[in-house]
Amino acid sequence: MLRAKGITPVNDPTNPFADVPVKGKEWMEPWIETFYNEGYTTGCGTSGDKLLYCPERGANRLEMATFIVRIFEFPQLP
């Protein structure tokens, strides 16, 4: 979805997530951080003073719909 908006991920040294990066999938880290920094996600919970992203858990239909609405700025219906 970030690519569709023309957003290139930037590696942020202040990673807010306790469970990122995932061993063997370090390439995801800049994408996840950019997704968070753009305001498209708040993660899936907290662990102490850090957020959790839960990168190994799939997104359900409601979460995907929320991402699409936030990213493409669809108007909210009453």
Image: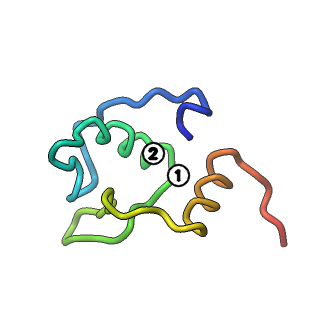
Instruction: Using the image, tell me which numbered label, if any, was put on residue 35.
Output: 2
Q: Position of residue 27 (x, y in %)?
A: 28, 35
Q: Nearer the viewer, residue 58 or 53?
A: 58
Rendered-image quadrant of the C terminus:
bottom right
Mark 1 residue element: loop
How many residues crowd around disc 2 within 10 Å: few (fewer than 14), some, or many (20 or more)? many
Which quarter of the picture shows residue 31?
top left
Dot 2 or dot 1: first in sequence order is: 2
Q: Position of residue 4 (x, y in %)?
A: 61, 33
Q: Is residue 38 left or right of residue 32?
A: right
Q: CA distance from mark 2 to mark 1?
A: 6 Å
Q: Residue at x 15, y 47 (%)?
A: 23
- When the figure is inspected, residue 37 is found, relative to residue 56, above or below; the finding is above
Residue occupying the far right of the picture: 78
Rendered-image quadrant of the N terminus:
top right
Q: Residue at x 25, y 46 (%)?
A: 15
Q: Is residue 51 left or right of residue 23?
A: right
Q: Position of residue 17 (x, y in %)?
A: 26, 55
User: Are discs 2 and 1 less than 8 Å apart at CB?
Assistant: yes
Give, as a three-letter code, the residue at label 2.
Phe
Give, as a three-letter code, the residue at label 1.
Tyr
Q: Residue at x 30, y 32 (%)?
A: 11
Q: Residue at x 64, y 52 (%)?
A: 68
Q: Position of residue 34 (x, y in %)?
A: 41, 40
The residue that disc 1 covers is 40
Mark 2 residue element: helix
Q: Is residue 2 left or right of residue 57?
A: right
How many residues crowd around disc 1 within 10 Å: few (fewer than 14), some, or many (20 or more)? some
